[in-house]
Image (tube, helix red, strand yellow):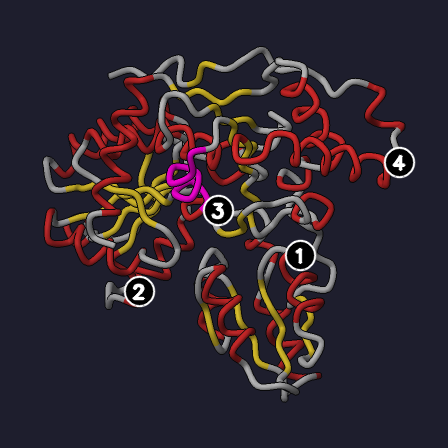
Amino acid sequence: MKMMDVLQHTQKQVLPEIYKDLSEIEMVERVKKIKEKFGARLFIPGHHYQKDEVMQFADATGDSLQLAQLSAANSAEYIVFCGVHFMAETADILTEEYQQVILPDMRAGCSMADMADIHQTERGWKIMQDTFGDSIIPLTYVNSTAAIKAFVGENGGATVTSSNAKHMLEWAFTQKERILFLPDQHLGRNTAYDLGVPLENMAVWNPILDRLEYEGDAENIQVILWKGHCSVHENFRVPNVEYIRETRPDMKVIVHPECSREVVECSDYAGSTKYIIDTISEAPAGSKWAIGTEMNLVKRLMQQHPDKEIISLNPHMCPCLTMNRIDLPHLLWVLESLEKGTIENQIKVEATIADGAKLALDRMLARA
């Protein structure tokens, strides 16, 4: 199937100027009143990386899949998803037809998800099939577009999260001899390495040049890693860890597996966002931590755990720029539009794409 028109959504609108001139106090009061007015008809999920100005109104906080599942379990008519595009897509795929998913700012995308588009993937898959035959099963990180999820679902594969990636790779190896892992090469590499796959048995697929980046006998390849990455987590480097070791030897380093293999290898701990949150929460008072993940979350952990010393592994890090597009003015705008009977920035995944993507999601959820 050629996936040309992946999304149907209302025409993208620009934030009206009036919202740029409102004070924060006024916007907060307006949002509170609208939430109270809509009651159970409105559900606002907020991703861990969102700004505090938005998170204060979240009915639930969590990672992308968790929030999509909570949206599906909720009977609210309107889901105003404070996250990024692929997260709202997943919420639309899992929710009922009467539920309408809204993204406050349509510019809130994900650079990692955008690194694997469906045209590149279909073209690359044909070349891989010609090279390796029917020996590859595709897996995709949930941080991917609905079209990529559908492609994976239709080719027998499944989605993975950073929490269950190891479990899903183990399953995938019972299905086929090789795995194509989209779109984050670092999560794929770190997970496969932890399962005992040698680095020399991993190749990288370059979607720009339509070729494998690999030296050696191609028959030895067990994992093909899509050449994509998280623009936030790739900015944590080995010198950041070395600096902590030299200047703060009493401080533990914990990072997300979207960081490079080299950074994960020289850190003390590595795991999903939930793993990082739980580890810090359970750590003893007085413990010291350098955290390698998104800055909004690191700052929130600092506020929540004043009994611990917490810093960012990279002091020059900025918050995720696309996540930060969801702000108080945009949230108020889409809520006031709803109040007036207008839906701005609705996310609607075309039915055939949604069906394929749900196959990939369901294969994962069946093994949770």
Picture disc at residue 229: 3
Among the 4 quarters of the image, the one containing residue 331: top right
Dot 4 falls on a residue whose secondary structure is loop
Image quarter for residue 132? Answer: top left
Q: Which amino acid is tagged 2?
A: Tyr
**Tags 1 and 4 in contact by the CB under 8 Å rule?**
no
Question: Looking at the picture, does residue 344 appear above or below residue 277?
Answer: above
Q: Residues within 10 Å of mark 4 (few under 14, many from 20)?
A: few
Residue holding disc 2:
193
Q: Are marks 4 and 3 in contact (CB under 8 Å)?
A: no
The amino acid pointed to by label 1 is Met
The residue under label 4 is 23
Q: Secondary structure at mark 1?
A: helix
Q: Amino acid at mark 3?
A: His
Residue at point 54%, 51% (across, down): 61
Q: Nearer the viewer, mark 2 or mark 4?
A: 4
Q: Position of residue 148 (x, y in %)?
A: 34, 31
| x then y, percent, for residue 242 | 61, 76
What residue span does the magenta drawing correspond to? 67-75
Q: Magenta stretch: dominant SS?
A: helix
Q: Which is more foreground, mark 4 or mark 3?
A: 4
Dot label at residue 295: 1
Q: Nearer the viewer, mark 2 or mark 1?
A: 1
Does the segment drawn in magenta span residue 125? no
Q: Is residue 286 above or below residue 102?
A: below
Whole-angstrom CA distance, mark 2 to mark 3, is 17 Å
Of label 4 and label 3, which has the lower sequence position?
A: 4
User: Which residue is at 48% across, 46% downward?
Assistant: 229
